[in-house]
Structure formats: structure tokens, C-alpha cells
Image (spheres, rainbow, N blue to C red):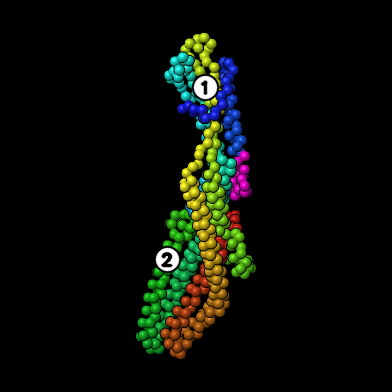
Amino acid sequence: MSFPPAAGAGRARFPELPSGARLAALGMALLLMGGASLAVAQVSAEPLVTPYPVGLEGRSQALKTGIGNLDDGLGVASQESGLDDLIRFALQNSPTVGAAFHRWRASLERVPQARSLPDPQLGLGFVFDEVDRNTEYMGERYSISQTFPWFGKLGLKGDIALREAEAEGRRYEAARLAVVAEVNAAWFEYAWIRQAAATARENFELMLRLESVARAMYRAGEASLSDVSRAQVELGRLDDQVRSLTDMLGPAAAALNASVGRPAHAPLPTPGPPSVEVVPPLPLRDDEAWLMSARDRNPELAAIQHDIERERQEVALARREFYPDVMFGLEYERRTGARMAMMDGGGRDMVVGMISVNVPIRRSRLDAGVSEARARLAATGHEAHVREYLLETELRAALFAWRDGARRLQLYGGTLLPQARQSLATTETAYRAGEAGFSDLVDAQRVLLEFQLAHERAAADRAIARARILALAGEPIEEKTP
């Protein structure tokens, strides 16, 4: 397709050159046009902010630390494995982390696309009929054109893509922190259910022993039949509790495997009781210090801030749409004619320079684009406020859960459990001596079971709250080698 010369286009005549020289000159013009386009693209591609990280070094590092291929049989389910091994495995194999990483990677690839000039246009035209019978003109036309966006448009598009990449990078960090917190929660929930089932089973065996004591005393005439019946009723209740907790192990194990990124039926390490698991203490900070740290370092909040900056750039780009884009072109005409070709080898060649601009006259459309960009900016600002309020609420709740879990852990482990064990032993001795009823013995055994379960629940809640606090506060993940 040929490009007609624009109004006011200048015409310059080439000197008489051989066909090969003329084609070489056209090729040189094309190279110069392409070089100019590349130079403009490089100038426009300079970032206004430091990428996060957009460079090849940062990108390769992200590829190395993001998604790896770890064999599922590398001791993850061995007895020597533990929570740290599951976290390490999850960071390398979790589908959630993998999806966030590839979204970040895709956004990085959009940056050079946004900063690039549009492709140049090449044209080829043929004149198949005479324009004027007196001149008997026939010939060919070759053209090339390049569109250049108005000053600043290309840079704004690159900045928009860069801000989006930075936001996706922060969301990738948030996904990693969330997976660590999720694995912690699933691990300690699984550990608590296992320990609760074991504790209920121990209490069932204890009640079985007490039931045999009641039957022996009944045969000796020292206890009533109601004591035996009460013991058997309590045995039925404990048996149901053991069965229920044992059945809960399957869903809990599936949830833990899902958080790690493994099939639901995959084997798992055997966790110890939550009260025995080593849970490092939190850094000594008050609530306000934790909130300040979360506002500064929480990756989800940082991602929304990048979204706000991106929307601001979108507003600036929408305003630039009121300015036209410029197209520069070059057309080479090669004349051939039957009689002139026989006389002097053809007509004189000609080169035509072209320049054109689009005319942004649809003011209503352009005004609507600016209004849309401003509305999106306002919406993103409100989302940032909502996220900040939710962050404070979640962090305060997690801090309370941490303190409450530590308090209950100390209360049950240091005071109530020893007293409950002593009370059960004293009540059993009194019952054997006929100084206490069997109901008192059952109540003492039930209180002991309740305190044992509450002690392990407090330990699990404290550990889950700690992981949640670190994730909300944006604390860096401790990468532990196996």
C-alpha cells in the first residue's frame, strides 16, 4: 500500500543513479529511520523510579528464589522433618506462591513493551495505469513511516507498567508471608488435634481404670450400682470424643498438605504437642510500635501504594491524550515508462518526505478518559484506607491472641494442671476410702481433661498468633537450610 504525500510535503529529485545504488540509498534511509526510532525508545525508557527489581540481576535472583523443583521425597515426611522443612517446601512449591510469582514475572515483561515505540509501517505501491497520456508515467512507490507519541506519553506508559510490576512484586512478598502463616496455622492445628486425641484417649483409659475400681467396690458392697453406671456413661462420652478427634485428623492433615502444596493424602511428619514445640518469642515491642512497623513494611499495603502511584500516572497519561501523535514518513518513487525506458533507462526517481498528526477533536471522549482515571485513583485511595484499617484490626487481634495464649499457657501449665492432677489423685484416694462420691471423682477427671485440652489449645493459639503477627508486620522470612 502506498502513502500519498501529505499537504505541504516537499519533493526532492534524486540524481541519476543505477538501480542498485538507488536501492542501497533506500536501504540506508530505512536503517536511519529505524536507528532514530530506537534512539527515541531508549531515551523514553529511562525509569523515573528505581525498579523492584526490573533488572536482569534482580529478575534472575527472583527466578532462583521463587519457584524451585524440590523432590517430594526429600525427607519432608520423615521423623526428622518438622515445621521448618514444611515451610521451606511450601515456599518453593506452593501453587499460591507460584501464581503470585508468575504474575509478577508477567508484569515485569510488560515494562519494555510499554516503553517501546509502535512498529514502523512499510508500504509498496504500483502504478498500473497512465496518469497522463502525454507523459505515459508508470512506476513503483516504496514508503516507510514511524509514529512518535507526543512528548511524555511513552515515559508515562513505561512508568505505569513499572508501578504495576512493583505492586505485583509486593503481592508476591505478601503471598510468601501468607503461606508461612498458613503453614504455621495448619501445622499447630494438626498438632493440637493429634495431642487432643491422645489426651482424650489417655483419659478414656483412666476412666476405664476408675470404672473397674467402681465395679470392684460394688462387688465388695462398698459402692452402689449407680457409680458403675455413671462410669460407663462417662466411658461412652469419652469414647465418642476420642473417635471425633481421631476423625478430625484426616481433614487437618489435608489442610496442612494443601497449605504446603502437596496432595491431601501425602504423608506428613509427626508433630509433638503444641506446648512442647519450640516457639521463639516475639521481638519486644508495644502495640503502637508493631502498628508502625506494619504500616511501613506490610507488603499488601505497599502494593496498594504502588497502585495509587500507577493511577496517578494514568491520570497524567489521560491528560496527554489531548495532544496529537506525530507520524514521519519517507516515500521513494521509481518511475518507469516504455518509451522513456528505451531512451534513457527510465524516468527520474523521486523521494517524498511526509509528516502527519492525528487530530484529537473528540473532547467528550478525552474528558471522559480523564474523569475515569481520576475516579479510579479515588477508588484506589479508598481501598488503601480500608486496607490500613483492616490491617490495624487484624494486627491488634493477633497481638491479643499472642498475649492471651501466653497467659493461658502459663496459667494452665504452671497452676491449674498441677492442681487438677493433685485433685484427681486426692479424690480417688477419698473415694476408695469411702469419703467421696463417684460423681466427685468423675468431675475431677473431667476438669483434668478440660485443663489438658485448654493448655494445648493455648500453646497452639500462641504459635498461630505469632506467625500471623510477623506476616502482618512484614517481617522478613527466615530462610533455613535443611
Q: Which amino acid does label 2 sit on?
A: Met
Determine which residue is flagged by label 1: 333
Residue that badge 2 annotates: 248
User: Is residue 151 or residue 173 the one in the foreground?
Assistant: 151
Magenta stretch containing residue 481, yes or no? no
**Relative to 137, does residue 41 appear above or below in the rendering?**
below
In this view, the residue in front, 11 or 180, is: 11
Question: Which mark, by number, is residue 211?
Answer: none
Q: Nearer the viewer, residue 361 or 325?
A: 361
Magenta span of residues: 43-59
In the image, residue 55 lies at what x, y percent? 61, 44
Is residue 57 rendered magenta in the image? yes
Residue at position x 50%, y 39% from top? 359
Q: In the rendering, at what x and y percent does residue 176 appear?
A: 54, 56
Q: Which residue is drawn at 48% across and 52% down?
A: 372
The part of the image, by quadrant, that contains residue 252 is bottom left
